[in-house]
Image (spheres, helix red, strand yellow):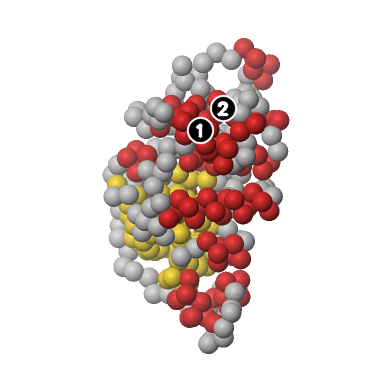
């Protein structure tokens, strides 16, 4: 379950997210939609603990994100829109690396079905540079699902996938929700959200415009018309002059004062694993490879140096 109360995120004097409150129960898929710059990515990155929120509270599967970030992050997965991978690790080695971070002892028995589900089993020994954009995205998804999270945050996860890949990713999300996962999915592909989501949260300028089940939100903006699409509902809800839904009283938290443990660090210590020697990469020793974990993408967050495969 995901429980959010009074979530606010500020960058200096600019408020990107203002007093958001909502709950996503096991089995529910919440579609987070809004115009560009509405605060969707800031919301998701705050919920995943990648960036600290300014005030409010977030509970992930019963674990307070500010008070016990490691326990909360063991239960969640965040899927960014841009795949960030290690140039010198193969597909199989990426999965082994993530398994070491999350302490997944039987990762091989989990990894192979994931690779087959995502249709990259035949790419297991290839490096990222040998993969297409869509294949890289599938690898990121496989890494995120490896520890079987009960909470999932998807930020435009379908970017770069072909139509068949989009359809299978949609089915995968629905199947995991039916198995008890709580899912938040942000995408501009509203026709697919309409097929997948049980609930919708529409935001504009960081504020909640509408929230409820898909049927409730459609009924609110359909004007009694039948067969109104989610795309049309979105356009009506975010039109200039649309009322903002009343916000819950803000709940102040110490989250902003406490450092959040990034997802790419070891959960036990909060420190990056020590790197192994990598003779083949000596020629590019001064280059900083992109990071697998999601803190490298999105707004207002700098890219830290990534950990390498632990011994």
Which label belongs to residue 311? none
Q: CA distance from mark 1 to mark 2?
A: 8 Å
The front one of 158 and 5 is: 158
Which of the two discs, 1 and 2, labels the residue nearer the N terminus? 2
Which label belongs to residue 111? 1
Report the residue at 30% width, 57% height from top: 252
How many residues crowd around disc 1 within 10 Å: few (fewer than 14), some, or many (20 or more)? many
Residue 140 image point, x, y percent: 56, 39
Check if mark 1's residue and mark 2's residue have beta carbons within 8 Å: yes
Query: The residue tagged with tag 2: helix, strand or loop?
Result: helix
The front one of 115 and 25 is: 115
Above or below, comparing residue 280 to residue 102 in the picture:
above
**Residue, disc 2:** 92
Report the residue at 34% width, 60% height from top: 5
Question: Mark 1 or 2, which is nearer the eye?
Answer: 1
Q: How many marks?
A: 2
Residue 159 image point, x, y percent: 64, 50
Residue 303 image point, x, y percent: 55, 37
Report the side of 148 relative to 131 (left or right): left
């Amino acid at each position: 379950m995901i429980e959010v109360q009074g979530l606010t995120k500020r960058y200096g004097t600019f408020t990107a997210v203002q007093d958001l409150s909502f709950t996503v129960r096991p089995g529910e898929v919440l579609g987070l939609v809004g115009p560009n710059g509405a605060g969707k990515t800031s919301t998701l990155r705050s919920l995943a603990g990648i960036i600290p929120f300014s005030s409010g509270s977030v509970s992930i599967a019963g674990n307070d994100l500010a008070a016990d970030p490691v326990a909360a992050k063991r239960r969640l997965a965040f899927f960014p829109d841009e795949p960030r991978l290690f140039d010198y690790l193969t597909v199989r080695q990426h999965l082994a690396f993530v398994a070491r971070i999350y302490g997944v002892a039987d990762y091989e028995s989990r990894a192979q079905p994931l690779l087959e589900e995502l249709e990259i089993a035949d790419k297991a020994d290839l490096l990222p540079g040998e993969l297409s954009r869509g294949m890289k995205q599938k690898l990121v998804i496989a890494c995120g699902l490896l520890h079987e999270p009960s909470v999932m945050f998807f930020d435009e996860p379908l970017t770069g996938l072909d139509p068949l890949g989009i359809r299978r990713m949609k089915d995968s999300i629905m199947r995991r929700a039916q198995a008890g996962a709580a899912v938040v999915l942000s995408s501009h592909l509203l026709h697919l959200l309409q097929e997948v989501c049980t609930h919708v949260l529409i935001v504009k300028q960081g504020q909640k415009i509408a929230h409820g089940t898909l049927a409730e939100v459609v009924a609110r903006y359909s004007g009694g018309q039948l067969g109104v699409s989610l795309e049309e509902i979105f356009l009506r809800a975010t039109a200039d002059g649309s009322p903002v839904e009343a916000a819950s009283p803000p709940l102040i938290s110490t989250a902003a004062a406490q450092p959040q443990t990034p997802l790419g660090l070891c959960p036990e210590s909060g420190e990056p694993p020590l790197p192994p020697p990598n003779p083949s990469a000596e020629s590019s020793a001064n280059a900083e490879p992109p990071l697998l974990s999601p803190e490298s993408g999105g707004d207002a967050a700098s890219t830290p140096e990534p950990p390498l495969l632990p011994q």
